[in-house]
Amino acid sequence: MTVNVLLFASYADALGRPRIEMAVAPGSTVADMVARVRDGHADRLPARPLVAVNQEYATYDRVIEPGDEIALIPPVAGG
């Protein structure tokens, strides 16, 4: 199945694009998907970035469904 992974701010800068289209196996979890995104980019992304699935914060054990939209959310600061 294919999912869209959205990258924002420093994560988009680090990977050089705002979106990744990724094939994942049925039954894959958010943790599996993050590991795949980090593969080859581990020095540019934290081990456990904040993740949202379909615009809601998600835990790392959440199973990804076909068509889900995943967002990796970098740390933000306010002032």
Image (cartoon, helix red, strand yellow):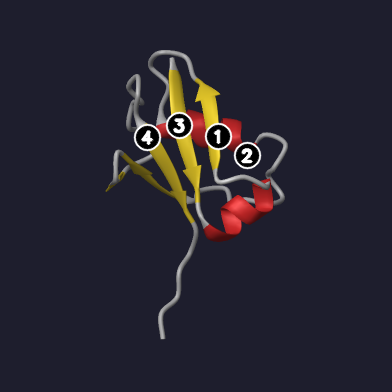
The amino acid at mark 2 is Arg
Q: CA distance from mark 1 to mark 3?
A: 6 Å
Q: What residue is pinned by disc 3?
A: 4
Q: CA distance from mark 1 to mark 4?
A: 10 Å
Q: Residue at x 67, y 53 (%)?
A: 14
Instruction: From the top left corner, tell me how far across and down residue 70 is, in percent.
Output: 40, 38
Q: What residue is pinned by disc 2?
A: 38
Q: Residue at x 44, y 26 (%)?
A: 3
The amino acid at mark 3 is Asn
Q: Are marks 1 and 3 in contact (CB under 8 Å)?
A: yes
Between residue 59 and residue 78, name the one nearer to us.
Answer: 78
Q: What residue is pinned by disc 4?
A: 69
Q: Is residue 29 left or right of residue 13?
A: left
Q: Are marks 2 and 3 in contact (CB under 8 Å)?
A: no
Q: CA distance from mark 2 to mark 3?
A: 15 Å
Tell me the quarter of the picture where residue 26 sits: top left
For the N terminus, which image quadrant? top left
Q: CA distance from mark 2 to mark 4?
A: 17 Å
Q: CA distance from mark 1 to mark 2?
A: 12 Å
Residue 55 position (above or below residue 8):
above
Of callouts 1 and 4, which one flags the residue occurring earlier in the amino acid sequence? 1
Q: Are marks 3 and 4 in contact (CB under 8 Å)?
A: yes
Q: Residue at x 50, y 54 (%)?
A: 8
For the C terminus, which image quadrant? bottom left
Does dot 4 land on a helix, a strand or a loop? strand
Does dot 1 land on a helix, a strand or a loop? strand
Q: Are marks 1 and 4 in contact (CB under 8 Å)?
A: no
